[in-house]
Image: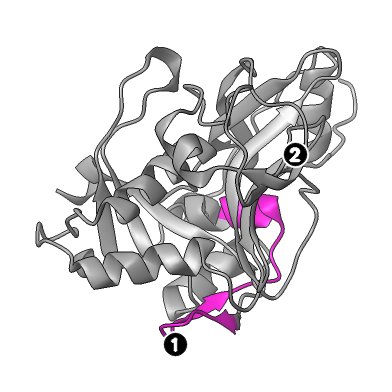
Amino acid sequence: MAPIINVSNEILEHLKGLKVPYDLVETPKTAESQEQTAINYQINPSDFVILEGKSSGKDSYPDLWVCKYRLGASPAVENAGKRIDLNVSDTAQEKNNRDYIGNINREQALRLNLTLGGKTLNIRQAKDFLALLLSGKAFDGKGNKINKTELSQIAEEIIGRNSYRAEWYEDYFTGRDSLTLNKNYVLENDVLVPKYSNNLTTCLMEDRTPGIDLKNWLENSTAQGFPKKNLKYGNLWYWHPRENSAVWFDAYPDYASLDCSGDPQDTGARLGVRHVREAHAEK
């Protein structure tokens, strides 16, 4: 039997992009590890916004509960961090004085959400979530209508120009001559595996600093959620997708940006992640 070599998820994704064949070998789980498969993460439905699912072929998604805030430390979250060998702590604060976790790279962000029984937004879902917030018409997990002022404050935390803050999305690009978009990640044998790996459809493949028009992007994106080639110019800075790159949204005192060229290993005290649940799991 050949020796087993442990490699990172980024290496596996790179191999996939190069079309190098490999097999994931399932190792037997101990009784202890089987008992640790679930974290008792109690959430407050009032802290979530209902995002109705969208149907567009391969890029469809179900009804979601999207947290109003970036993920903050709590006993359950700290426990989930220990499961993935990650010491979590609040490192930043939103304008509403809610503390949140930073200093996590992309893989850690995805693993943390999955260990908590949730997931991480991809750019298509994040775009639709932002559009919902700006519409001023949304409901929380209890079915109560959310005040327009609160929705505006949540949107402002994402795109407003004040102190720097950012959040991870799950999208990851592999391939060189033609990019593959990977998303809808799950944990299989402790490995992050994308359930969606398809060619990146034609989109805007040039940086604009500045910028693209926010409203035009929200109303007229590709089915995968990215800006179209003919998108109007505007004030939202944009870095196009590249090989072995990740996606995040960040904002500074001078501008906000959609960055599709991020280093998946980057961390920062103000770079956090938002927790998401499938709506059916909360019924």
Left or right, residue 47 beside residue 78: left
Structure colour scheme: one colour
Identity of the residue furthest to the front in this view: 233
Three-letter code for the amino acid on which mark 1 is drawn: Asn
Residue 215 falls in which quadrant of the image?
top left
Residue 120: image location, x then y, percent: 49, 48
Up-down: is 216 above or below 108? above
Residue at the spot of label 1: 97
Residue 128: image location, x then y, percent: 38, 41
Give me the residue at 27% from left, 50% from top.
135
Left or right, residue 48 beside residue 159: left
Residue 92 falls in which quadrant of the image?
bottom right
Give me the residue at 61% from left, 56% from top.
109
Residue 244 falls in which quadrant of the image?
top right
Left or right, residue 16 beside residue 102: right
Look at discs 1 and 2 and give the one toward the viewer. 1
Residue sitting nearer the eye, 194 or 177: 177
Residue at the spot of label 2: 9
Three-letter code for the amino acid on which mark 2 is drawn: Asn
Kindly tell me whether residue 43 is visible in this rendering. Answer: no
Find out whether residue 104 is within the magenta segment: yes
Kindly tell me whether residue 79 is visible in this rendering. Answer: yes
Give the class, few, some or many, for how many residues have Cα within 10 Å of label 1's Cα (few <14, many ≥20). few
Find out whether residue 27 is within the magenta segment: no
Give the class, few, some or many, for how many residues have Cα within 10 Å of label 2's Cα (few <14, many ≥20). some
Give me the residue at 43% from left, 73% from top.
76
Residue 168: image location, x then y, percent: 61, 54
Residue sitting nearer the eye, 99 or 147: 147
Q: Give the range drawn in magenta.
A: 92-111
Label 1 or label 2, whichever comes before in sequence order: 2
Task: Indicate which disc residue 266 carries.
Answer: none
